[in-house]
Amino acid sequence: MRTVARYIFLFMLAALPAWAQESPYFVTYDHHLEEPGNLEIETQSNAGVPRHGEPSYFAPYIELEYGINTRWTSELYLEGQSRSGDSTIFTGWRFENRFRPLAGEHRINPILYFEYENINEASRIQKEIPGQAAEFDVPNSESRHIRAHELETKLILSSDVHDWNISENFIAEKNLSHNEGIEFGYAFGISRPLRTIASAANCHFCRENFIAGAEVFGGVGSTHAFGFQDTAHYLAPALSWQVSDNSSLRFSPAIGLTSKSAAVLLRFGYSYEIRGFKDKLAGLFRSKP
Amino acid sequence: MMKIKMKTAISKMRSQSWKLVLFVAAAWLAAIAAGQNLTYRQDPNWQPPQAAAARSNPLAQNSGAAGGGRKLFLRECSECHGQEGSGRKRAADLLLPQVQKQSDGALFWKITNGNDRHGMPSFSRLPELQRWQLVLYLRQLPVSASTASPAQRE
């Protein structure tokens, strides 16, 4: 019964709506923040097939992203994981903030990223994979008891060049629960809309509604063992489709590049943006005329 | 005895971590309240560089592109500026002569860079041509008769 309830919970995570005209990246961040007062609800999932016969896994998560002002976006994540032949569990939450230190557009736009994670070692959303690669053969019954309170920072550098977006993320993560040193990682992405001029018609399948790109991400060890040994790296083509004015779908298959990487990751995302959320919320508490 | 001590320590840690979570949440909400931009005021200091203001619209001769501009306007701008562009509490009335007399390049620069002080986000995530389409559409909005100069009324 508990397993059924867990599957229903995971299904609900995956079925809820998530944002509009998104970059196609799942791991790399660019410099475009959420617009002030808007709330984006996004569900994403990461399905992984390990390379050496370990059970495959499915990790959905919900992301609530709110634009606090033009230079500050805040996000809350709730995540779960289901492992083939094993259990389905809640793996924790993350709270993330992105700040834009410089006003206006620049050739290179820096963004500062800070995240607190309260997760366990069963987490498989793989939003980033700093340090050494994760072990895929540990059952959920064990890994769920290993808590990880982590602080993560990223330096995001992003440029828009002739409608191409080029983004570079440099990641440093510190696990406060265990002495793993400071772990490092990276993510690079490039993307472009398939058409750069908008047609007058409201069309779903116009090329302007699609953005294609690719990203590469991985870990580079830690302060204990810096380098590429035992690290995971992925190359992932990615596509986003703006389904309507405020919702979009994303898809990205990632290919593992090293023996420690999973063979394949399949990612899906659906997002829904509530524009003027702050005003709508305030309207609920306004006195009746 | 050892077990009881452990339990006490764990419950103490839990209560401390809840206090920390509550403190962080309260601090976050206070910071959000301080970071809001609730009312619109014109910003005389929001001026584009000369070179940016002098740029001309590459779609100026393509009047058909304004249709796409209207679609983009309704999607991206109408939440704050209103469906007719006449503005709301926290965004400019785009029909005002002060807005309409600005050059295409100036409007393009403002759409691209936004204005942090007044809550106008940057729309650089839109491709360049789409931002020019927005400028083209803004030019089709009627100038407010009440505040327009005699020359603009003609």
Image (cartoon, helix red, strand yellow):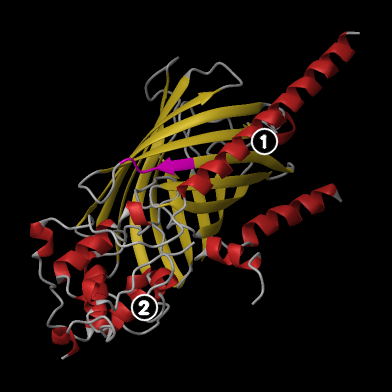
What's the amino acid at mark 1? Leu
Q: Residue furthest top?
A: B1
Q: Residue at x 29, y 76 (%)?
A: A198
- Badge 1 or badge 2: first in the primary sequence: 1
Label 1: chain? B
Label 1 close to label 2 by CB (< 8 Å): no
Does the segment drawn in magenta span residue B20?
A: no
Q: Nearer the viewer, mark 1 or mark 2?
A: 2
Residue A139 place in picture, x, y as percent: 70, 33
On screen, residue A54 versus residue B145, left or right, reads: right
Q: Residue at x 66, y 45 (%)?
A: A80
Quadrant in the rendering for residue B4:
top right
On screen, residue A120 versus residue B73, left or right, reads: right
- Which segment is the magenta one? A97-101
Q: What distance separates the C-alpha of mark 1 from that of mark 2?
A: 42 Å
Q: Using the rendered image, report if marks 1 and 2 lie on a common chain.
A: yes
Residue A182 place in picture, x, y as percent: 46, 21
- As drawn, A229 above or below B1: below
Residue A102 place in picture, x, y as percent: 29, 43
Category of crowding for the residue at label 2, using alpha-carbon neighbours closer than 10 angstroms: few (below 14), some (14–19), many (at least 20): some
Q: Quadrant of the N terminus of chain B?
A: top right
- As drawn, A81 above or below A64: above
Q: Residue at x 45, y 31 (%)?
A: A130
Q: In the rendered image, which residue does mark 2 sit on?
A: B86
